[in-house]
Image (tube, rainbow, N blue to C red):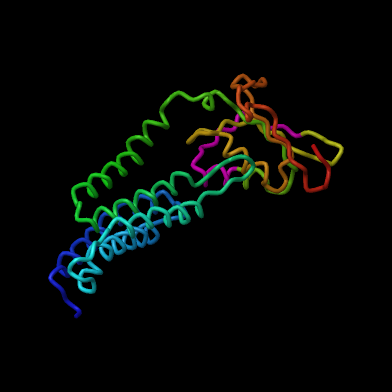
């Protein structure tokens, strides 16, 4: 039997999951995250579908005295979504990225499950609160005091290879605005190099950007210092201790 008494309700709940999860996905897409609109819509629809199947899918094939526990399938959704969330989290040079995207996927699954369970008010409230957290709280977080605002970066790179252009491109892609204070040419045993002193203004933490800059071809040294140009001793592991990388010529700087 293709149509049942609950078909209309199921379609409405699926449509609600589609709309609400699309709102979450659009925000992630605009933020240029790896999991964007399509991923969030599919996660939400899948979660809603599993919840609807667990609630309505077996009503016509079970005996009258059978006991149905809709929470069993829904509980497996929570377990399964963890694998998808783990797939967007990666760690590079002690910097963890993708946690916010993984959390948004987890919340999208919850929105889909709430829609599938008929809890449209709860699902709508979760969506609105998610958008507020990503916009208002994100704006507030960028304006909280941070020691990164008082730090400058000294970068030494090989001259004549367009390295500074790539450094600025990496910083821009990560949402940082670059202020160049000074540049000077130096001579090293390996050849001509340029030392540039800059400040990067953007979303903290600054160490995430530093982890990317040390991998730019031609960069020989990245050092974080205080705004006065001196060395800064932070209490953490990444404190403004110099970060060195092996140059392309095979030597260790």
Q: Position of residue 117 (x, y in %)?
A: 23, 56
Position of residue 206 relative to residue 63, above or below, is above
Q: Position of residue 151 (x, y in %)?
A: 58, 25
Compared across the picture, whether 64 is left or right of 234 comes to left
Residue 8 found in image quarter: bottom left
Residue lying at 25% horizontally and 69% vertically, measured from the top left: 58
Compared across the picture, whether 64 is left or right of 24 comes to left
In the picture as drawn, the residue positioned furthest to the left comes out as 5
In this picture, which residue range is highlighted in magenta? 168-185
* Front residue (pair 107, 160): 107
Compared across the picture, whether 144 is left or right of 228 comes to left
* Front residue (pair 139, 70): 70
Compared across the picture, whether 239 is left or right of 84 comes to right
Q: How many marks?
A: 0
Residue lying at 42% horizontally and 32% vertically, measured from the top left: 142
Residue lying at 25% horizontally and 62% vertically, measured from the top left: 68
């Amino acid at each position: 039997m293709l149509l049942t008494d609950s078909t209309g309700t199921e379609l409405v709940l699926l449509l609600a999951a589609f709309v609400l999860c699309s709102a979450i996905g659009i925000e992630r897409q605009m933020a240029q995250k790896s999991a964007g609109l399509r991923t969030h819509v599919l996660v939400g629809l899948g979660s809603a579908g599993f919840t609807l199947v667990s609630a309505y899918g077996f009503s016509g094939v079970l005996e009258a005295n059978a006991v149905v526990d809709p929470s069993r399938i829904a509980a497996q959704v929570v377990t399964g979504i963890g694998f998808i969330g783990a797939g967007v989290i990666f760690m590079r040079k002690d910097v963890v990225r993708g946690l916010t995207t993984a959390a948004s996927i987890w919340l999208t699954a919850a929105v889909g499950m709430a829609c599938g369970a008929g809890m449209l008010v709860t699902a709508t409230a979760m969506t609105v609160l998610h958008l507020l957290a990503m916009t208002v709280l994100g704006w507030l977080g960028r304006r909280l005091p941070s020691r990164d605002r008082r730090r400058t970066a000294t970068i030494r790179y090989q001259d004549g290879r367009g390295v500074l252009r790539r450094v600025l491109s990496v910083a821009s892609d990560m949402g940082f605005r670059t202020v160049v204070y000074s540049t000077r040419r130096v001579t090293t045993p390996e050849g001509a190099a340029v030392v540039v002193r800059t400040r990067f203004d953007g979303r903290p933490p600054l160490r995430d950007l530093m982890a990317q800059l040390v991998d730019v071809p031609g960069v020989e040294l990245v050092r974080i210092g205080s705004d006065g140009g001196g060395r800064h001793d932070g209490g953490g592991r990444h404190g403004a201790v110099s970060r060195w990388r092996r140059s392309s010529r095979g030597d260790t700087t």
